[in-house]
Amino acid sequence: MQKIEIRMVLEVQEFKMGFFDFIRNKIFTSRQTIIPSNKQAIGNLDIRGSLCTLTSQQLIEKYFTNQENTFVVDSQYGVATKGWFEEEMFKFFEDEMKRRDIWKYSESNDCDNFAWEFRNCCNWANALDGEIPSIAVGTIYYKQDYGSGHAINIAIVQENGSLVKKYIEPQSPDFVTLTESEEKSIIFVHF
């Protein structure tokens, strides 16, 4: 068997400033609103005021009947308000994707890429501020009523005093509704 060596070449700058500073400077060089302090989330995406928490067990038991295809990897999740998504996150995501010149749909940048990017973007706030649990946003794969497979996001959000499951089309970005048959066709859920 042939031995394969994989090397990761990193700039010396990474070692001087720390991983998150390096990533912030490398990816967000044109954006000046990134994490001025440990107590603030990305730019205007300060989620702290609209966050409650949910354990992974609560997430599975309340929102997913078919646990076989549901992967919940963190022990606790932060649940943001519906308004946080509508007023802040959707615009931030679209602006960030456009800034990185990856907003256009293509065969190599299709629905699953958008869904994973949206999930990741929602969690940048907690990744850069270790006190916030992962945001309760996941990626799902399902079969649309007209036949083709599709990937979108799922989120548990606070709405009118309750925690509710919402679906998000990240290519819009906006909340969407799945039909009963589409919900039953979900084959993969990853939080």
Image (spheres, grey):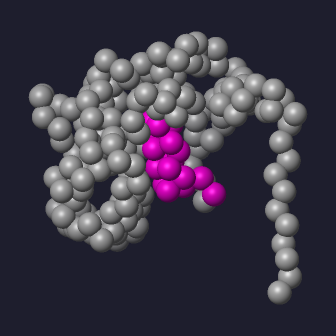
Q: How many marks?
A: 0
- The residue that appears at 22% across and 46% down in the rendered structure is 165
- The residue that appears at 36% across and 21% down in the rendered structure is 48
Q: Which residues are magenta?
A: 108-124
Q: Quadrant of residue 52?
A: top left
Q: Is residue 31 left or right of residue 140?
A: right
Q: Decide if residue 140 is in sight here.
A: no
Give the vertical position of 120 relative to 33 (above or below).
Answer: below
**Residue 124 x %, y %:** 51, 33
Q: Quadrant of residue 104?
A: top right
Q: Quadrant of residue 175?
A: top left
Magenta span: predominant SS is: helix
Q: Is residue 184 left or right of residue 132?
A: left
In reply to whether residue 153 is colored magenta, the answer given is no
**Residue 31 x %, y %:** 64, 19
- The residue that appears at 12% across and 28% down in the rendered structure is 160
- The residue that appears at 58% across and 35% down in the rendered structure is 97
Q: Is residue 162 left or right of residue 123?
A: left
Q: Looking at the rendering, in which quadrant would you find the N terminus?
A: bottom right
Give the vertical position of 128 relative to 110 (above or below).
Answer: above
